[in-house]
Amino acid sequence: MTASLMAAPLGQSDLSLPYVLDWYGCDLRTGIVIEELRSFSPGGALSRRLGTHTTLSGTLGLLAAPTDWEAATDQGRSMLVAVDRATDTPLWAGLTLTRAGGSAQAVELQLVTPEAYLDRRFTGTINLVQQDQAAVCTSVLGPAMTDGPPFQLDAPATGTLMDYSVLDGDDRTALSALQELMGAEGGPEWTVDVAWNASHDGFVLPIRVRPTVGVQSTSPEAVFDFPGCVTSYSLAESYEAGKGATVVQARGEGEGDGRLSSSAYVADALISGGWPRWVYRFTPAAGQNDPTQLNAHAAKALALMQTGARVWQVEAAASVAPRLGRDWGLGDTVRIAVESSPRHPAGADMVARAWSWELEPGSNSVRPILVEDD
C-alpha cells in the first residue's frame, strides 16, 4: 500500500449518487491499512447505535482478493473500515470475529463494531469521589487503552461531578460500566467513531464522551421530507412495559428484604392530570447496589418513559437525502417534515435525534432511527 490512501475527490454531482463504499482491511492494533478489499460484499445493512455495538456479516470473494487478504481479515487481529467514496469519510468499522471458508470461492466474515471490544476488557478497582463524569469514564476505559485497538480518548470535562466505585472482583467490563453511567440521570453519553489517521494510511477510533453526543439544534439543517427524499416512514408509539411508566423504581441485586431499591419516582403532574399509575421496576443491566446510583437510574427512566416512546423509522433515498457523515451523524438532531400522509393528514414537523442508523449502499437506502425527546 502507498503511504497515503487519499482517493481523488469526486465531483459535486457524485454526491447525488447512491453510496459507494470502499472497504479497507486494517491491523487491529495500529489501524494501519493492510489491503483494500474490493471484493468484499456486506451481507446486510451497516448500522450504528449510541452506547452499544452492532454486527455485520459479509463475504470476501477470493478470486479477486488482494495478495495479503488473510492478514487483512484475520480474526481477532483485523478490522474492516467502510469509507464513503464521494466524501472520503469513514462511516463504519467492524472488528473481525470469525472467518470461515474452504472449497467455496469466498470466505464468510462476521464483524462487530468496536464498542464490543470494551466488553472484553475489565475496569479493575476504581474508587472515585466527586470527580467529573469524563474523568470517571476515562478511568473505566483505562485498561482498554493498553494493547488494544487504536482508540483515542475524546472526553472533555462535562462539568458534572459524581462518585463511582467498582471492585476488580465484580468482573465489571468497560462496556457494562459505560452503559451503567449512561443509564443514570444526567449520565454522560458515549460512542466510538472511526476517522482517518493523520497520515491517511489507516484509521483511529475516537471514543467520544459528552453530556450529549452529537449536534443538537432546534432548527437542524438536515431535513428528511415526505414527499421528498423520504420514501416511507412509520411513527411507532408505545406504552409497553419498559417503554412507558408513570411510576419507576430501580432495584438492586439480591432477594427479599435485603434487596436495595431506589425511591419511587412518580410522574405526579401526569397522574394529577388524569394518567393512570403505570408501575415499572427494573434492575440496571450491569447490576447495581449503590442507592444513589439506583435513584439516578430510576429518575432517568421516568424522564424517558412517562409519556411513552415515540420512534420515527424513516427510509430515505440515500442519493437525495442529507448525506450521512457530512450533513448529519449519530446523536445529531434532524428535522422530519411531513406535508401530508395517511397517519398525518394535516402534516407534521418534528425535530428528533438519530439514536441509530442503517445504510444499504447497494439499494440507495439510508434509514435513520429517530427518537423524540420529551
Image (cartoon, rainbow, N blue to C red):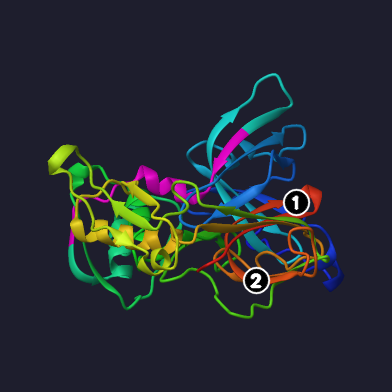
Residue type beneath disc 1: Pro
Residue 231 coordinates in the image, percent (x, y): 80, 57
Identity of the amino acid at label 2? Met
Task: Tell me what residue is drawn at x 31 percent, y 46 percent.
Answer: 283
Residue 251 vertical position relative to residue 301 in the rendered view, above or below: above
C-alpha distance separating marks 2 and 1: 27 Å
Residue 313, image x and y in percent? 66, 55
Pointer 1: what residue?
361
Whether the residues at callouts 2 and 1 have beta carbons within 8 Å, the answer is no
Q: Which mark is residue 147?
A: none
The x and y percentages for residue 279 are 36, 50
Q: Is residue 125 covered in magenta?
A: yes
Coordinates of residue 312 in the picture (x, y in percent): 64, 58
Residue 203 visible in this rendered orientation of the protein: yes
Q: Which mark is residue 350?
A: 2
Q: Is residue 293 magenta?
A: no
- Answer with left or right where residue 222 lies relative to residue 274: right
Q: Residue furthest top?
A: 103
Q: Considering the numbered disc 1 on the image, is that residue within a helix, a strand or a loop?
A: helix
Mark yes or no: residue 146 visible: no
